[in-house]
Amino acid sequence: MDIGLHVSHDAMSEGIKFN
């Protein structure tokens, strides 16, 4: 499962709003 990668890419694409 590449959930971590997906989330990381998503966050980076959205400006890392997760961090």
Image (cartoon, grey):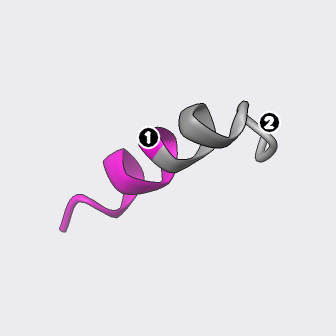
Which mark sits nearer the N-terminus, 2 or 1? Answer: 1
Q: Secondary structure at mark 1?
A: helix
Q: Image quadrant of residue 17?
A: top right
Is 1 displayed left or right of 17 in the figure? left
Q: Residue at x 39, y 52 (%)?
A: 4
Amino acid under label 2?
Asn
Q: Position of residue 2 (x, y in %)?
A: 23, 59
Badge 2 crowding class, 10 Å Cα cut-off, few under 14, some 14 to 19, many 20 or more, is few
Q: Nearer the viewer, residue 10 or 1?
A: 10
Is residue 3 placed above or below 6 in the rendered structure?
below
Is residue 13 placed above or below 5 in the rendered structure?
above
Q: Secondary structure at mark 2?
A: loop
Q: Which mark is residue 17?
A: none
Q: CA distance from mark 2 to mark 1?
A: 12 Å
Per the rendered image, the range of residues in magenta is 1-9
Q: Which residue is mark 1?
A: 9
Q: Residue at x 67, y 42 (%)?
A: 14
The quarter of the image holding the C terminus is top right
Total residue callouts: 2
Amino acid under label 1?
His
Badge 1 crowding class, 10 Å Cα cut-off, few under 14, some 14 to 19, many 20 or more, is few
Is residue 3 placed above or below 4 in the rendered structure?
below
Is residue 3 placed above or below 10 in the rendered structure?
below
